[in-house]
Amino acid sequence: MSNILFEGIYAATFSIYDENMNVKRDSVEKLVNYNLKNGLKGFYVGGNTGECTVLPNKTRKQMLEAVKEFAPAGTQIMAHVGAGHLEDVEDLIRHANEVGVDAIASLPPSLTSYYNSEEIVDYYRYIASLSKSPVLSYVTPVLTCDVVWFAKQILAIENVIGLKVSIPNYYAFERMKMVNNGDINILNGPDECLVSGLAMGADGAVGTTYNLMPATAVKIFEDFKKGDVQAALKGQNKLNRLVDAVLGNNLATWKAVMDVIGIDPGYTVAPAQMPSKEKMAGIIKQLEAAGCLEEMHL
């Protein structure tokens, strides 16, 4: 059986909750519907964009349950289970097993630099042993080992199918995709380099901007797969104008852009501060000038 289970564009889903850390179900439903209407294949729930390690498990579980409830059958859902404490990781895996997901995923263990490469591989071996669904590992800049070696070690673990790769080193990316004769499910992480990832063999992509401009990202993927690289690059240019407008701001600002598509972004846990009306007005003006609002089908 092939390890390539995830192909296409997936949102790194925003966690939407109130000041009591309860998920705002109406907002989640609207976001799920907006993303699926515009062609996304599914959702990566509870990752960095979903504020994983700063949220209590209560909120993370509610978020996964809401996405699972509002997404129709056939929608692929990946549950990120990485947390600051191993007992929380175990709890989130148990919950994912109960809810039923298409895969779990995890960042490397917290305080990654405190662990050697073999210990990090052992972490993934352990969570894979607990999961009823396939497992995706994660390559981030905090990994200090050789990432190709890491990919080989990870794929040798039973129940691990691949990697979410969030480093912008596409030479290393290409070499990782060659592991196991290419039968390794690799999802591109950097939104601003989606075309680069596809060129180096990515099966799909998970990203923050895909919450907000899903149709643009899907068209990039489809154009590239059809061989129309120029059209894919044109779409990448448009997507990157969203990155330009919001990059350098906190996650609360990224979430606040959901207001533009009629979705209440809720609260963002301290110490993050919600952006001022003036700041958001400037961002929206920049997005409008770049044609991004049109890409959001507004």
Image (spheres, rainbow, N blue to C red):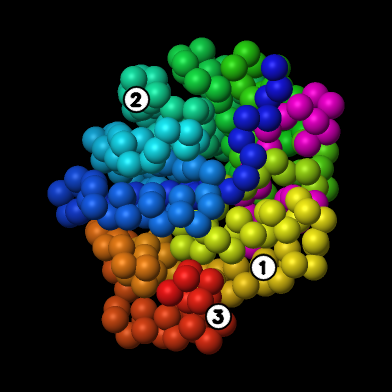
**Is most of the magenta stretch helix, strand or loop?**
helix
Q: Which residues are magenta?
A: 177-199
> Is 159 on the left or on the right of 44, as rendered?
right
Mark 2 residue element: helix
Q: Quadrant of the N terminus?
A: top right
Amino acid tagged 1: Gly
Q: Quadrant of residue 119?
A: top right
Label drawn at residue 215: none
The reply to whether residue 4 is visible in this rendering is: yes
Residue at left 47%, top 71%? Answer: 297
Q: Is residue 284 above or below residue 93?
A: below
Mark 3 residue element: loop
Label drawn at residue 235: 1
Amino acid tagged 2: Val
Q: Quadrant of the C terminus?
A: bottom left
Residue at left 53%, top 71%? Answer: 295
Distance between mark 1 and mark 2 Cα atoms? 36 Å
> Is 200 on the left or on the right of 220, as rendered?
right
> Is 222 on the left or on the right of 37, as rendered?
right
Q: Is residue 272 above or below residue 174?
A: below
Mark 2 = which residue?
99
Mark 3 = which residue?
291
Amino acid tagged 3: Gly
Q: Is residue 42 above or below residue 102?
A: below
> Is 276 on the left or on the right of 158, as rendered?
left
Q: Earlier in the sequence, mark 2 or mark 3?
A: 2
